[in-house]
Image (cartoon, coloured by chain):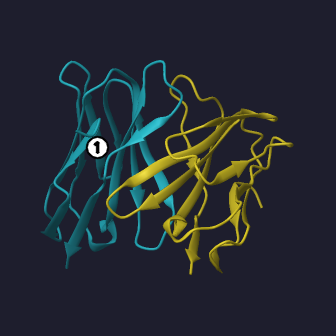
Chain colours: A cyan, B yellow
């Protein structure tokens, strides 16, 4: 079993829909990252969380440390949000990020 | 230009050849990382470096060599390329590895070994 699990693996939605991508992890962490990767493109950091909730524009990220779970929400989704979203955790006391497999999001106009 | 850059962006090489992928960052970040990204595996850490002349293995180091003689550069060398090393390689840097410091990723190098 992977230390970081994302769901769903693939998600297709219509423009304007509210999107939720989930990330569960099985280890103690010091931080959790949400990353975005457009097709053929580089990787961009969206959020870094160690507790609570962060908001940037239409994107909201939450984390529940007790439940070892994080969610990434996109409000009023747009075709330009189509990308792979990757959850990564920094394990406590370890010197690396552990990545989820990613969620491929497609927003149709 | 400021930021983190990788070169080349695309490379095709033959089995058995030596290949070096370059990574350069202008922030003077202490930590630098090399990842490979493959379908079905996500991103996996190959090597990382905490400072100049300090490097350590990640999850999949076999077949790779790194060096870090200067803070800003972190080259990754495939000493004898194999087809299983066909992948997209990402370099990243961060100010500090511990705590909650972000990693900044380069644009990636797509390597094909024929």
Quarter holding the N terminus of chain B is: bottom right
Q: Say if B71 sits above or below B37 in the image.
A: above
| Residue found at the far right of this picture | B69
Q: Is residue B72 above or below residue B79?
A: above
Residue A38 x/y as whole percent: 41, 67
Is A19 or B39 nearer to us in this picture? B39
Residue A17: x %, y % from top left: 13, 62
Q: Is residue B70 left or right of residue B19?
A: right
- Residue depicted at 23% across the width and 42% down the height: A5
Residue A58 is left or right of residue A15, and the answer is: right
Residue at image x 51%, y 34%? A96
What residue sits 30% from the left and 54% below the top?
A102
Residue A106 lies in quadrant: bottom left
Task: Report in which chain the residue with disc 1 lies.
Answer: A
Q: Which residue is mark 1?
A: A60
Residue A89: image quadrant is top left
Crowd rating for badge 1 (residues with CA inside 10 Å; few <14, some 14–19, many 20+):
some
């Amino acid at each position: 079993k992977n230390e970081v699990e994302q769901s769903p693996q693939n998600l297709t939605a219509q423009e304007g829909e509210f999107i939720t991508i989930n990330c569960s992890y099985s280890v103690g962490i010091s931080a959790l990252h949400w990353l975005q990767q457009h097709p053929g493109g580089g990787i961009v950091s969206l959020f870094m969380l160690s507790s609570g909730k962060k908001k940037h524009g239409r994107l909201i990220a939450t984390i529940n440390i007790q439940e070892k779970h994080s969610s990434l929400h996109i409000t009023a989704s747009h075709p330009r949000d189509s990308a792979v979203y990757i959850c990564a955790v920094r394990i406590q006391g370890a010197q690396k990020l552990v990545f989820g497999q990613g969620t491929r999001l497609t927003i149709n106009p | 230009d400021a930021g983190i850059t990788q070169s080349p962006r695309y490379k095709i090489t033959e089995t058995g050849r030596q290949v070096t992928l370059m990574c350069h960052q202008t922030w003077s970040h202490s930590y630098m990382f090399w990842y490979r990204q493959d379908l079905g595996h996500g991103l996996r850490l190959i090597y990382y470096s905490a400072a100049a002349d300090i490097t350590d293995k990640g999850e999949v180091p076999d077949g790779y060599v790194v060096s870090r003689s200067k803070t800003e550069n972190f080259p990754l060398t495939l000493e004898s390329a194999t087809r299983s090393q066909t992948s997209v390689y990402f370099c990243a840097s961060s100010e500090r590895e511990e705590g909650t410091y972000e990693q900044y990723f380069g644009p990636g190098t797509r390597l094909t070994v024929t």
